[in-house]
Image (spheres, rainbow, N blue to C red):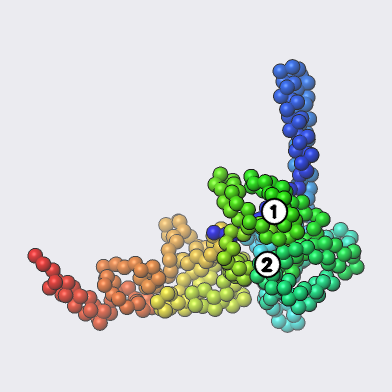
Amino acid sequence: MNHTSFLPFPSISTLQVRSYLQLLTHTISLIFLCPCTAVNVIKNIVIWTKKSKTKKNATAIDESKVDWKQLDDLGLSRERLEQGGELEKMLNWQKTNLVTIAVPIGDTTIYTEARLAFRTDDNGNIGLAIHPLRKEPQLDFPYMGYKFSPEEKEALLATGNLGKTIEVTPKNAEPFSAYVSIDPQTNEIIALRADRVNIPKEIKGVTLSDAQYKDLVEGKAVKVEGMTAKSGKTFDATLQVNAERKGIEFIFDNNRGFKERQQQTQQQGVPHKLCGLELSDKQREALDSGRTLYLKNMVDKQGQPFNAYVRMDKEQNRPRFYKWNPDKKQETGKERVVTVAEEHKTQVAVNNHGKTNEATKNVKEPLKTGQTQPTAEQKQKQDENKRKKSRGRKM
């Protein structure tokens, strides 16, 4: 369950919607009074709707204007981003989630993680913006000419949001008032111009009080109760403007601080360690790109090693374990998905999932690597347990 979501600010003006509704009401009246005129008005509505859609789609990036070699230089490809669902975000001026990139330095290549986005330069050319993962937010240094106080640093680290607007001054640009937040994926400090934010008076069916609206505009966290979800269910949440999301953030679990929510966000994607096996940068990159790897010496919950084919499930954002290579068709012509390699199937079923069969019934100790039958010692204990139960049974 996600603990935060956000409400994007509307891109269609209220005036446009009102004009459309007035035109539609007028058309309904004309249907009864003058059908011919009504037909012409309906045609105009269709044309207006098509123009609106075209205008909306025009904000997306024209793929033909993108220099795809920029991705190749980072060890990425258009196909890999498309497969992971990240390309669509980039073509709509959004940032990707964290992806693994390869940075060549001399004769070596450094693998790191970053969020990517397309941006335009002063000449209108589309370039690649790289937002690398930082160990921690750089709060001890001036940000766009603004120096954070100890209290402001504490607020950013505790909630991820500054909780107020401040005046920042970009290089070679005029100062402006901004909301400030921390990107939970990269630890980058993000500023959002306050004059470009239009906070609605009504959110999810609840009209904000004057005090709530004022606090929200100022950047403070506001508790709102009785909102209605799309499913029709009511819910409560804390709302706050989030600069990184460019919208209003919904925080559902106030007991979990920003650090905890951030750790959950950064754990998405390919893990650094899988069942006790430390993955190399190349292995993580391969799994992230959708490839299947055969990994050896992973360790189950009982501390026993096992091997398996592994591939990332992009929809559920988790690794999947396979008995056979899922990229190759089996004799049945269908992909057979099981837990692990055959020689470790019984071991992992017993040790990790608490399952058993007739042979391993009543075996208390963890099974060893590749074990499917009890050892002589375990068999002896099984027989002793059976005899004890038999003697204690009343007729």
As drawn, which residue projects farthest toward the top?
33
Residue 150, quarter of picture: bottom right
Residue 240 in the image: state x and y as whole percent: 68, 58
Q: Tag 1: Cα neighbours inside 10 Å, few (<14), some, or many (≥20)? A: some
Of the residues shown, which amino acid type is indicated by label 1?
Gln
In the figure, 363 relative to 199: above or below?
below
Rendered-image quadrant of the C terminus:
bottom left
Name the one closer to the observer, 171 or 199. Answer: 199
Residue tagged by mark 1? 212
Whole-percent x, y for residue 121 in the image: 85, 62
Whether residue 177 sits left or right of residue 261 in the image: it is right
Q: Position of residue 188 (x, y in %)?
A: 72, 70
Q: Nearer the viewer, residue 294 or 315?
A: 315
Residue drawn at (59%, 46%) of the image? 228
Determine which residue is flagged by label 2.
Answer: 160
- What residue is rendered at 79% in x and 39% in y? 15
- Quarter of the image holding residue 374? bottom left
Q: Residues within 10 Å of mark 2 (few under 14, many from 20)?
A: many
- Relative to the observer, which residue lies in front, 390 or 23? 23
Residue 48 versus residue 295 in the image, above or below? above
Residue 1 appears in view: yes
Q: The residue under label 2 is which amino acid type?
A: Gly
